[in-house]
Structure formats: C-alpha cells, structure tokens
Image (tube, rainbow, N blue to C red):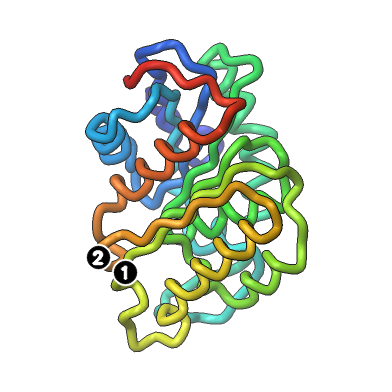
C-alpha cells in the first residue's frame, strides 16, 4: 500500500508471517523492492516494512545546517529534528494503526544521509529498538563530536556498515567515511552499546539494498526483545 501522508510518499508492506517488528526506512527513492528482495535472499526473519520517500533529502536528513560539501546543489538546512518529530507524531501512529500493531518493536533504517539521520535520532528518541546506518554519511561536519559528547536515550542495538572503497574520493569529507564509521563503532562498543560494524566491498553506490538488509538481519537476530519468527 502506497499513500501520500502530508507531503511524503509512504509505502507500507505488511509481513506475510506473524511478527511484532516494524522497520522504518527513509529512502531517497522507494527502495521497498530492493530491500525485500535482498532480505529474502538472506532469509531474514519476518517484519513489516515502511519506506518513506519523496523526502527533502539534504534538508530533512541533516541534523544541523552545513555549507555545501559534496556539490553546489547541496541543501543542508538541518531539518532532521523537525522531520523526526513528524515521524513520531504523524507517521508512526498512522502506520501502526494501519498494521494493527499496538506495541511493536521498531527498527530505524537508513542509507547514506538517512543512515546519518538514524544515528542522530538515537539521541533524540527512545522509540526504536535498533538503529541501522548503512553507508551512513558520518562524514557530516561535527557529527562525530556530537555523537561522542551526547548520550543516546536508550541502549538500543546499533549496526554500522561502510563500503571498502567509499573513502576513495578527492573530497576531504568523503575520505574520512571508513575511519569515522570505525571510530563510531569502537566508541559505542567501549561505552557498552551492542554495536556491530561491517565492511562491505565496493563504493557508496554498490548493493544498497543488500547492505540495508544485512543490518535488518543482524539487528533482528541479536535483540532479545525482538520476537524472531520464520523467514518471510
């Protein structure tokens, strides 16, 4: 089912098997098919999937304003807090009423800028059982300092991954992606958070659906509070 909720496109895919897990994914385009196809190949446990697209990508996924970093078309206005409030007050109640889930386990999934958003949300809400940042834009200015100087609201599972060629770039920010992802992973582990790091083959534009699906599988199989049933 695909609907327009306020200005965003929301695709809700109920699980074929009983489950209390809902994966919320902010996507540059509607990545529903890619994620579900990869999850089937990985034999992921069953989950409901909500994909939000037609997002103001740079604006809604950026935690605070930043200058143009990647291209002259960058628009990092720092609307992540406002967008997260919309998720919590409008999106989640709507989807969970539609799915008839009254007390689900929620996973927040993101790739690239929405992977950055997923990590930022961990410091602003305790509504999710796990946070997945696949090829997350942790190069974002001052994000590492923010993450290490603030305390997440809940000790949720954290999954971090990055491609082994993502740091091959003339851009000084993108050159830091692997090191900063590792640094975050080591920091979360050292402070007692259940965190998993994975280095994938390829650059930023390789196997996006698969990388996200690996995060779903790991978080579902490693959270004792999540009811894991048969693969969907």
> In this rendering, would 140 be left or right of 231?
right
Sequence-wise, the earlier of marks 1 and 2 is 1
Residue occupying image coordinates x 59% and y 43%: 157
Task: Indicate the position of residue 177 as horizontal and vertical percent values.
Answer: 45, 73
Label 1 to label 2, Cα distance in Å?
A: 6 Å
Residue occupying image coordinates x 56% and y 33%: 223
Q: Which residue is mark 2?
A: 202
> In this rendering, would 190 be left or right of 21?
right
Q: Is residue 82 visible?
A: no
The quadrant in which the C terminus is found is top left
* CB atoms of marks 1 and 2 within 8 Å: yes
Q: Nearer the viewer, residue 60 or 14?
A: 14
Total numbered labels placed on residues in the image:
2
Disc 2 on helix, strand or loop? loop
The quadrant in which the N terminus is found is top left
Disc 1 on helix, strand or loop? loop
Task: Indicate the position of residue 25 as horizontal and vertical percent values.
Answer: 46, 41
Residue occupying image coordinates x 42% and y 75%: 73
Task: Indicate the position of residue 40 as horizontal and vertical percent values.
Answer: 26, 29
Q: In the rendered view, tell whether residue 215 sits above or below residue 223.
A: below
Q: Which residue is mark 1?
A: 164
Q: Nearer the viewer, residue 149 or 84?
A: 149
Q: Nearer the viewer, residue 189 or 104?
A: 189
Q: Label 2 neighbourhood size at 10 Å, few (<14), some (14-19), many (20+)?
A: few
Q: In the rendered view, tell whether residue 125 sits above or below residue 230.
A: below
Residue occupying image coordinates x 70% and y 67%: 148
Task: Indicate the position of residue 139 as horizontal and vertical percent values.
Answer: 51, 74
Q: In the rendered view, tell whether residue 136 sits above or below residue 227.
A: below
Q: In the rendered view, tell whether residue 110 sits above or below residue 15.
A: below
Q: Quadrant of residue 18?
A: top left
């Amino acid at each position: 089912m695909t609907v327009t909720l306020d200005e965003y496109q929301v695709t809700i895919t109920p699980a074929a098997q009983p489950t209390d897990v809902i994966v919320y994914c902010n996507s540059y385009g509607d990545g529903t098919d890619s994620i579900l196809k990869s999850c089937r190949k990985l034999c992921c446990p069953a989950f409901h999937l909500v994909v939000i697209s037609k997002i103001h990508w740079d604006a809604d996924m950026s935690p605070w304003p930043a200058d143009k970093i990647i291209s002259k078309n960058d628009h990092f206005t720092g609307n992540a807090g406002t967008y997260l409030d919309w998720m919590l007050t409008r999106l989640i109640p709507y989807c969970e009423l539609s799915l008839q889930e009254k007390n689900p386990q929620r996973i927040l999934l993101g790739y690239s800028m929405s992977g950055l958003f997923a990590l930022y949300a961990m410091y602003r809400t305790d509504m999710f059982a796990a946070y997945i940042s696949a090829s997350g834009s942790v190069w974002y200015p001052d994000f590492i300092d923010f993450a290490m100087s603030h305390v997440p609201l809940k000790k949720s599972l954290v999954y971090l991954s990055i491609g082994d060629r993502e740091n091959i770039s003339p851009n000084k920010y993108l050159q830091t992606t692997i090191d900063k992802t590792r640094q975050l992973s080591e920091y979360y582990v050292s402070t007692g958070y259940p965190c998993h790091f994975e280095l994938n083959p390829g650059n930023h534009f390789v196997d996006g659906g698969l990388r996200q699906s690996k995060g779903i599988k790991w978080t579902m199989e490693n959270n004792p509070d999540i009811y894991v049933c048969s693969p969907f």
